Image (tube, helix red, strand yellow):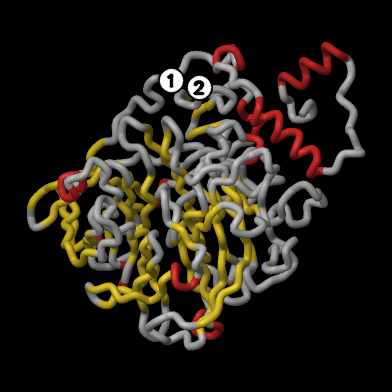
Amino acid sequence: MIRSGDARATQLFAEYKQAMPAFTSLSEADIQAIVSFIHSNQRQASAASENPDLGTPLLDPIPDKIASSGFRLSLEEVATAPPTAQKAPLARINQMRVLPGKTDRVFIEDLRGTLYEMIGDSLRIFMEMGKERPGFIHSPGHATGFGSYAFHPDFYANGLFYTTHTEKAHTATADFGYADSIRVALQWVLTEWKMTTPTSQVFAGTGRELLRIDMVTTMHGVQEITFNPHAQPGSPDYGLLYIGVGDGGAGENGYAFLCNTLSQVWSSVLRIDPLGSNSKNGRYGIPPGNPYARDQDAATLGEVFCRGFRNPNRICWTPDGKMLITDIGQSSAEELNLGLPGADYGWPEREGLFLINHRGKMNKVYALPENDPTFHYTYPVALYDHDEGNAFSGGFVYTGTDIPLLKGKYIFGDIVNGRVFCLESNQLQLGKPAPIAEMQIEVGGKVTTFQALTGNAKADLRFGVGLNNALYLYTKSDGKMYKLKRCSRL
């Protein structure tokens, strides 16, 4: 801590002229248990008393307002997902994926457990998680349930695809857990499935568990798994699975030590070889090219590709190969980040371009300290504050050919209020956040909003890409799906 420049450690050493002994008789598990006990029983200090030098809270972190893009998107309602509840959200439709092949196929999953194949404008059940895994749960929400899925790039040769889902706490021993003095709310499970006949219209086959993670709360779980679509056979990234793991609520519930270290899995994007076996549990591989795979430090996790996220809920790639990671913020900022190996994006010490105090209340942010460069955090390439929205709904760079006006634009939105935004993907660069602009939407020739369309203050907006790179927008609150047809200038 002293070598890292930590002010309190330096001050204490200067005052007492000695350091605490190493207690080499204690195992790593013993030390983690002691630290967990201390954290779970200490009284929370106020921000002012714990950190008197934070400065004045920023009441409006980003004063500039999002301007109009001058574009209007014309959407056509094409489908309504089967309702899986009696009240909003009626259908928790989440991620859309295209499975490339001789004939491309489109899939979309409902967090309540169903994976559909989209045939034209209708949805046909492909897999039901509850039937395959009886321990599956999808309550209480907060993105719990059937979290994500990804087809192996050699799917039609090996029949393999991957899913994440939630189960009750203590269903099985976790590969990544913590001291038993901290409550486990639920577990996230990564599974590899092998289809008997990859071309089948309905799943039939077997599954094997790759890893299991305990979570402090029900929120900020494992909401994204994906392969790099640009990686070609023979390249180092081919067949490697990226896994976005949130902090599980640890940051805001007094357990920041779980998500503020390279020795734990939370708040990270992992990269694994699902066909390998050199992991601790022997069920997957740790790629030698991972930034911490060969650092000769037993305390770091070789699975970690980059870290420092509260909720890395979407990962995608731009046409020119940039990896984009969205991070849903706490109190003030929503982030779009460039995914870089070994980078630290700051959570729970930073939110957006600001300092946040995880040692006290986390409802305010502050200006960065003068010594900020010494921490080597990587900051967002685009962001907006909570005057504009409350949760980043990750999108895609438009690569279709039908709408030239949108070429090269990253189109995304806000989950809660359903506003639709865009930015130029060629402006995404470190050190200079790209400007964000808002896009109007119209349905049936009438200008509207997703809050108006759903009749709900929480639109629950998501984005997907279908056949021929067509862009889809859909709302979990009512299960309706819209296809982008045109774009016009205002």
Q: Check whether the beta carbons of the residues at disc 1 and disc 2 lie within 8 A of each other.
A: yes
Q: Is residue 309 visible?
A: no
| Res. 37 mark | none
Residue drawn at the location 35% of the way across and 67% of the way down = 108
Residue drawn at the location 36% of the way across and 54% of the way down = 395
The amino acid type of the residue labelled 1 equals Leu
Q: Is residue 91 visible?
A: yes
Spatial CA distance of label 1 from label 2 is 7 Å
Residue drawn at the location 22% of the way across and 39% of the way down = 68
Residue 418 percent across, percent down from the top left: 26, 45
Between 168 and 386, the residue placed more toward the observer is 168
Specify the farthest residue to the left: 445
Residue 307 percent across, percent down from the top left: 60, 46
Decide: few, some or many residues near mark 1? Use Cα within 10 Å; few <14, some 14-19, many ≥20: some
Please tell me in which quadrant of the rendered image residue 233 appears: bottom right
Residue 339 percent across, percent down from the top left: 54, 51
Residue occupied by mark 1: 58
Label 1 element class: loop
Specify the farthest residue to the right: 25
Q: Is residue 381 left or right of residue 472?
A: right
How many numbered dots are placed on residues in this image? Answer: 2
Decide: few, some or many residues near mark 2? Use Cα within 10 Å; few <14, some 14-19, many ≥20: some
The amino acid type of the residue labelled 2 equals Ala
Q: Determine whether 311 is above or below 367 in the image.
A: below
Residue occupied by mark 2: 367
